[in-house]
Image (cartoon, grey):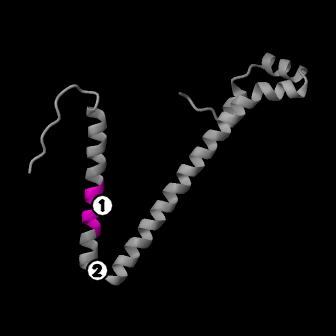
Amino acid sequence: MERPTPHDAFSTLTGGALAAIGALSSWIAVLVLLPRLLMALTHLMTQGSAAWTTSRRDSMWTRHEDRLLALVDPLVALQHLERVRRDSIQATVQGQTAAADSGNESPPQESPP
């Protein structure tokens, strides 16, 4: 489903539709445009929340890594951070592969011990 933006809420209306809406009383015009504007506002809030969450997560990881490097031997800390990042990337790739394979009817594959 395509998510509208505030600009899209008005850009899909033709000049004739805008003139017709302008000729209506204001409360009818609000009722006509309100659903599009509410959908655009919801989409804008969702994008803002996702950006804020990503920023907070990245900030948390940076603080965690800095604290780890300050408290532990730097070589051990860097090896740990490398292992954690590698494992998280592998888990992400495996999750995406599992999601792509979930539509197949083949039996699940056994993982090596």
Q: Which labelled disc corresponds to residue 74?
A: 2
Could you tell me which residue is drawn at 36 percent across and 82 percent down?
A: 70
Q: Left of 28 or right of it: where is 53?
A: left
Could you tell me which residue is drawn at 77 percent across and 24 percent down?
A: 32
| x, y percent for residue 38 | 69, 35
Which residue was labeled with disc 1?
85
Q: Is residue 39 magenta?
A: no
Could you tell me which residue is drawn at 62 percent across and 46 percent down?
A: 45
Q: Amino acid at mark 1?
A: Arg
Query: How many residues crowd mark 2 within 10 Å: few (<14), some (14–19), many (20+)?
Result: few
Q: Which labelled disc corresponds to residue 64?
A: none
Q: Is residue 15 above or below residue 97?
A: above
Q: Amino acid at mark 2?
A: Pro
Magenta span of residues: 81-88
Could you tell me which residue is drawn at 28 percent across and 63 percent down?
A: 84
User: Element under label 1?
Assistant: helix
Q: Is residue 15 above or below residue 81?
A: above
| x, y percent for residue 41 | 67, 40
| x, y percent for residue 30 | 82, 29
Q: Nearer the viewer, residue 68 or 104?
A: 104
Distance between the Cα atoms at labels 1 and 2? 16 Å
Q: Left of 62 or right of it: where is 21?
A: right
User: Element under label 2?
Assistant: helix
- Magenta: main secondary structure equals helix
Q: Residue 107 occupies which quadrant of the picture? A: top left
Q: Left of 15 or right of it: where is 8?
A: left
Q: Residue 103 occupies which quadrant of the picture? A: top left
